Image: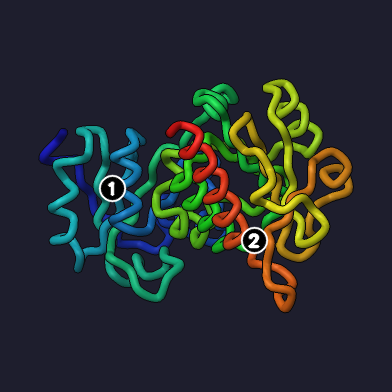
Amino acid sequence: MATESPRRVIEGRHHSLVKMLRRMVRKQELAADGLVLLETVRLIEDALASGSVIHKVFVSADATARLQGLLPKFSAETEILEVTPKVFDTLITTQTNQGILALAAEPRWATQDLFAQTPPLILVLAGIQDPGNLGTILRAAEAFGATGVVLTQGTISPYNAKALRATAGALFRLPLLRSLTAAEALSLMRQHRVRIFASVAAGGKPLPEVNFTEPTAVVLGSEGRGLSEEWRKTAEPLTIPMATAVESLNVAVATAVILYEIASQRAARKR
């Protein structure tokens, strides 16, 4: 690792890199060249630990001391750019910040990465719109042993700033495919002979009665509209048993409950 990286100073609000970062913040998405904007030291460290390449680091001129602990972890090619505090404050999405931003390479996953472990456990997120829910789901997916996640068209980007923070770095470690149609996701599960379940609020098979020890995919729909007709026709419905006074759970909470049940069944089978 390098102990010193090339460094230059950005003072103007109209610098091309400053404009690019503002576009990323405004769109809450990747830059066109496949870079992820990281807004916290923790996310930068998670990206480094996963082997992701850090291309550029932007540090506020009044926060350079915080950069010292990270410098040895960067490669010699990582460019360090010092930004005036006034300009830096226009680049962030949170009210409080640590004075450091970074551009890292977007994680790239192949289809086979999602099925590399046996038996596979795939989450299919079909239309999730809340970034906090999405990030929490990805974090739970990693915690409970999901082998991969598929985001169908209409699901919010995992590179939304709020979603990315909520993943706690899981986005850099958990195999993920984006922007598949429902038909493409369904075909992928069938190709790998994965049994497909859909989480529904009521009327499905009770969660503890479902056998999750075989290759499994669980489909979760949007917070407001639920699952599309295509998924309702093709996936086996399952329901989390709850007290009668409770109509439904938040989608992120429901996902964690389902994943915990799956993890428990698979652990019991190994024993």
Q: Residue at x 72, y 53 (%)?
A: 206
Image quarter (top left, top right, bottom left or bottom right) of the N terminus: top left
Identify the secondary structure beneath mark 1. Answer: helix
Please tell me which residue lies in front, 148 or 238: 238
Q: Is residue 140 above or below residue 94?
A: above
Residue bearing mark 2: 251
Q: Is residue 191 above or below residue 40?
A: above
Q: Crowdedness of circle 1 by 10 Å Cα count: few (<14), some, many (20+)? A: some
Residue bearing mark 1: 45
The disc placed on residue 123 is: none
Instruction: Find residue 113 and report its horizontal and vertical position in percent.
Output: 52, 26
Comes first in the chain, label 2 or label 1: 1
- Residue 240 visible from this viewpoint: yes
Q: Amino acid at mark 1?
A: Glu
Q: Residue furthest left?
A: 3
Q: Residue at x 29, y 39 (%)?
A: 49
Q: Residue at x 74, y 47 (%)?
A: 198
- How far is disc 2 from disc 1 in space, using C-alphas? 29 Å
Instruction: Find residue 37 and report its horizontal and vertical position in percent.
Output: 43, 51
Image quarter (top left, top right, bottom left or bottom right) of the C terminus: top left
Q: Amino acid at mark 2?
A: Val
Instruction: Find residue 174 and report its horizontal and vertical position in percent.
Output: 47, 39
Please tell me which residue lies in front, 28 or 216: 216
Please tell me which residue lies in front, 170 or 249: 249
Q: Residue furthest bottom?
A: 245
Quarter occupied by residue 256: bottom right
